[in-house]
Image: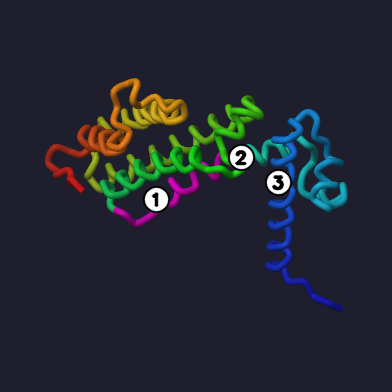
Amino acid sequence: MRLIYPCRMTSIATKTRERLLDVARQLFMSNGVERTTMNDIATASDKGRRTIYTYFKNKKEIYDAVIERDAERIVERLREIVESDLGAEEKLRSYIAARFAIVDETLSSTSATSQIISYITLDYKRLERIRRLAVEKERELFVRMMEQGMEQEVFDPEAALQLPTLHQLIFQGVDICRLRDTYHELGIDAHTVCEDVTGFILGRLIRKDKTVSTT
């Protein structure tokens, strides 16, 4: 009798679940959520309906899992930075640079799975759910980074408590300007905006008895 060890079963189960989510995501994008059925997902993934129901109770549960995964993918690079061993100032610089890069890379991608573009053109409601969930996750990460900076006595406590909200307002504006390509209309230099935002945030955040690095 062939033995299947627990770790191997977990790996297979994870791959199967990811496969089902990949297929469901593509079907939701191409057919719309309402017109996609559990049978469609089963057929397209080469899995039986019984297999799908092993992982998900219904289509809504699949849909919610797709939303959660897409939102997590948007912020996973930011999470890695926040969880790194970088110092508070360097961590914040890396975080802001990555935040700008995420938008640039998304909009320059020609992939059919490009976030933002695909969702704007095919399913605005789903885009909005992903955006809101990603914003929530991002805020939690930024708050954690502020707490780390205060613990290291690098960040001014008053500013650190205010900046999570200010950070979200700044980057909602950045996202819209980048998406619509309107930097020039506002007299903003698109090549230096990341440095400008970084300098502004650090200038407000770093304690007065600390020195803000120019690198």
Figure check: 107 above or below 148: above
Tag of residue 130: none
Image mark for residue 81: 1
In the rendered structure, which amino acid carries the disc numbered 3?
Leu
Q: Quadrant of the N terminus?
A: bottom right
Q: CA distance from mark 3 to mark 1?
A: 26 Å
Q: Secondary structure at mark 2?
A: helix
Between 127 and 89, the one nearer to me in the picture: 127
Magenta part of the chain: 68-86
Q: Nearer the viewer, residue 47 or 103?
A: 103
Q: What percent of the width, then of the height, locates residue 190?
A: 33, 33
Question: Which residue is at 86% across, 41% downward?
Answer: 39
Which amino acid does the dot numbered 2 rest on? Glu
Query: Mark 3 — residue?
Result: 21
In depth, the one of 106 and 199 nearer the eye is 106
Residue at point 18%, 38% (across, down): 207
3 or 1: tag closer to the N-terminus: 3
Q: Is residue 51 above or below residue 127?
A: below
